[in-house]
Structures are given as C-alpha cells and as structure tokens.
Image (tube, helix red, strand yellow):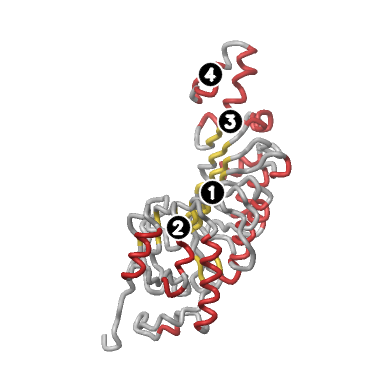
Amino acid sequence: MVASHLKQRDYTACVRVSQAWKQLFTPFIWRHIDIGHEKFRKMTQSDGLRTHGQWTQSIYLGGYEDLVKEFLEHSPERYPTLMNLSIPNPMCDSLIEDFIAKASPAGSGRGLRKLEISGFEGFADFAGGATDALLLHASTLEILRLDMMPCMSSEDIQQLLTSAPNLKEFDIAGGERDPDNDDMFLDARVMVSSEWVCTKLEIFACRIGGIPRPDITRLINRQPASGYVKSGTLEESMELHKGVYSQLARLTKLKELRLGARLKSTWGWSYESSERDRLYDCPAMSLASGMGVLKELKELETVCLNDMEVSVMRDKEEEWIKEHWPKVKGVSYDDPVEVSEDE
C-alpha cells in the first residue's frame, strides 16, 4: 500500500484532499506520536488522542513533566494497538506505570513489544506497579531497555525472564541502584531458582551478583578483600557458578553478553569506574569456575565484563574464547588496581 511509504507530513496533506482520503489517511497520522512536536501538542489539546488513539502504535514521550502529564490526561483509557513506548527522563515512577497500563495487555490479542526508558537516577524508579504493569505484556515483549535509572529488583527481573518467551533484547546494564543496597543487580540465587523461557534473546545486558568469591584475596582499596567480597565456601561458590552458567548457556542465539557496567550511557556520559563500585560477587568467568558450559554460545560477537573481578583474559581463557566464540573479536574488561600493603 502506497500510504505506508509516505512520510508524516505527507499524511497531513492527504487528509485535506477529500473525505475519502481523510478516512484512509487519518490512521497513519496517529500511528507514531512524538509529544515533543508542536503539532502533536495542539492535536492533544483538541482531544484528538481520545478520538484517534486507537490507531497509535508507538509513542515517544519527550518533553517536560507538565507536558507529559497533560498528554496522559488527554489520553484514552487504552491505546489498543500500542506496541512501542519510549520515555526519556521520566520525572516520577507513577508516569511509567500509568503509560504502560494504557497499552492493552497481551491477553487482548495485542501488547507492548518494545519499552525503552532513560532517565537520571533519583527522578524515577522502575519498580512496584510499573513492573506489575509490564508483566501483563510478558508474552509479547521483545525489547526492554532501561538506562541511567534505578532498575528492577532481582525477583522482578527473574519473573520477567521466566515469563517472556519472545524477548530478544534485555538491557538494564545502565541501571543504577544504591551501592549500599544488597539488591543491586540480579542475585545469582534468584537467577537459578527457576528456568528462563527467553531463549530467543540476542542481547543480554544485566549485572549478576551474589556469588561468594573466596578466590579473591588481593587488597582492595588497601584493605583486606573480606570487606568487599561476599563470604561463602568454595563449594557454595562453585554451585552458584554452575547454575548461573547453565542458565546463560541456554541462550544460544545470544550476540551480545554484557555483564559489566555500561561504558557510556545513551545520554553520552562516560562511566567512571572505582574500586568501591566494582562488582566482586560476580561470575568469575574462568574455566576453573565452570565457564566451559558456555561453549555453545557460538553467535556471540560482543562480550562486556567491565568493572567485574574476572579471570577471563588469562591465557587458557583467551584460547578457549578463540575456539568456542569465534565471532568475538575482543572481550571488554578492565584489570583491578593492584595495591601492596606497603603502599
């Protein structure tokens, strides 16, 4: 159909030609909404959303908080065909929940396929009601990206990964939480508690923690490692490593594996590493810890392990990667800052 190849400005001209053309092209005008555009602000104020929101497939909620709230107030009860939702810099978590709830849940025959949220830490949180609202779309969700904002709890992350069979991209590596909070990332014990269904994943970007690492004995910030490393026996560590690697090994379509910090946010800010923020209870990514289980991830192209205490770039691991991950050109990681007791 010719209409599907026209640009947004062309649809506006087409609806003026005749009543028949207006009926034909009006749905195309409302398919993609960017509230940062003056045209859509005026259309919103004229109650156009409630009249034509049934045609909306994607919404970009760029703009000031008052504008976003006004958009929400003029929205219909549901956007029955909404598939893609992008919310940059939300000012409060209730807005996230409200907009997700506006999309018809998967049980209606449709549901969200893509949710992308970016914002500054402290302004909004993705938790509670927002997670509950998103889980209603688990069966249709394909892409989830959270950047530069507090992320979901371990339990919420696990519930989504065990409920979203069509998920292709799960990227919350840019999410921040209080470093003093034990529930910072996906806890390994929660991760291995039930089997994931998201075997179509091509991008997995999520920090994993909660693993005892008695193998870490170096000084950290001139202090004994015990002050930073999660306590536990070698047997406990190996058992959790086995479960974590086994879960990841099922993602045979994976192209990107990012378990470390994002080096640069979508806002263009570079991430500054510090020993305090470094992840010490992460997977060791060594053959000794059972990494060999991941040998079937043949499609891997990108591996990011920044700000993690890992062993992946030792000689044995380097050779193993060349043999089993042939598409990986290099592993992104950083060495710890070694400090002797005398310094």
| Drawn side of residue 244 relative to residue 218, left or right | right
- Say which residue label 4 marks: 2
Give the CA distance from mark 2 to mark 1: 12 Å
- Say which residue label 1 marks: 168
Judging from the image, what secondary structure is the residue with disc 1 in? loop
| Drawn side of residue 80 relative to residue 31, left or right | right
Give the CA distance from mark 2 to mark 3: 33 Å
Quarter of the rendering containing residue 22:
top right
The residue sitting at 51% across, 57% down in the picture is 172
- Camera-side mark, 2 or 3: 2
- Say which residue label 3 marks: 31
Q: Where is residue 94 in the image (x, y as percent from the top left)?
A: 63, 53
Judging from the image, what secondary structure is the residue with disc 3 in? loop
Q: Which amino acid does label 3 sit on?
A: Arg
Q: Which of the labelled discs sits on residue 257, or is there none?
A: 2
Seen from the viewer's position, the closer of residues 184 and 201 is: 201
Q: Classify 67 as above or below 232.
A: above
Judging from the image, what secondary structure is the residue with disc 2 in? strand
- Camera-side mark, 4 or 3: 4
Give the CA distance from mark 1 to mark 3: 23 Å
Give the CA distance from mark 1 to mark 4: 30 Å
Give the CA distance from mark 4 to mark 3: 15 Å
Q: Classify 26 as above or below 317.
A: above
Q: Where is residue 183 in the image (x, y as percent from the top left)?
A: 56, 70
Q: Which amino acid does label 2 sit on?
A: Leu
The residue sitting at 50% across, 60% down in the picture is 206
